[in-house]
Image (cartoon, helix red, strand yellow):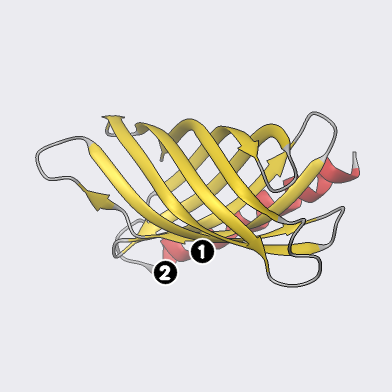
Amino acid sequence: MKNIKALTAVLLVSGLALVGCQRAEAQALPVDVSLYYTDNGVIDKEGATVKLGTEYKNLAVGVSAFTTTDKLESYGVYAGVPIRVSGSRVIITPTVAVDQYREESETVGSVGVGLGYIINDTLALSGTALTSRSFGGDSDNFRGETYSVGLVKRF
């Protein structure tokens, strides 16, 4: 229950921040809500990742949370630069991310790439591959690859 409250709080604060950004701009920013199946090699677990983000001046930023059926495992922030392949519905996004793993109290940095296919104006199929390493502590135990596949809904 405590994990659900933490995830709800992160999503609520992020949503309010994005709404505040939208009101500050003359042009409304898009809001992306994503749900992914994730194979997290850093802690060798599978689960779901939820992301809430936006894109401003060709920079995608947002917050994410990774959860298993038992608990919230990590939360973090990400940034990427979407590159639209000319004449197609494909988007390639080099990405960096920082995640805090709750149980282990480890901060992990990641770099990787996302690949998206735009289904229509508000829906995309997306996949990401990240390689991660701990910023400190026992970095041999907190590194690995994370793969995700899911849907992105734009509002």
Residue 24: give its label.
Answer: 2
Nearer-the-camera pick, 68 or 26: 68
Residue drawn at the location 55% of the way across and 33% of the way down = 36
Q: Is residue 131 left or right of residue 76?
A: left
Pointer 1 with pointer 2, Cβ within 8 A: yes
Instruction: Classify the position of the N terminus by image quarter.
Output: top right
Q: Residues within 10 Å of mark 2 (few under 14, many from 20)?
A: few
Residue type, label 1:
Gly
Position of residue 124 measured from the top left corner of the image (x, y, whole percent): 36, 32
Instruction: State the residue position of label 1.
Output: 20
Position of residue 28 measured from the top left corner of the image (x, y, whole percent): 35, 56
Residue 59 falls in image quadrant: bottom left
Nearer-the-camera pick, 117 or 143: 143
Residue type, label 2:
Ala
Instruction: Classify the position of the C terminus by image quarter.
Output: top left
Judge whether 11 appears above or below 23 on screen: above
Q: Is mark 2 on a helix, strand or loop?
A: helix
Q: Is residue 138 left or right of residue 145?
A: right
Position of residue 48 measured from the top left corner of the image (x, y, whole percent): 65, 33
| Residue 19 appears in the picture as rendered | no
Nearer-the-camera pick, 11 or 112: 112
Residue drawn at the location 21% of the way across and 35% of the way down = 89
Judge whether 149 appears above or below 18 on screen: above
Residue drawn at the location 51% of the way across and 64% of the way down = 20
Position of residue 117 measured from the top left corner of the image (x, y, whole percent): 30, 33
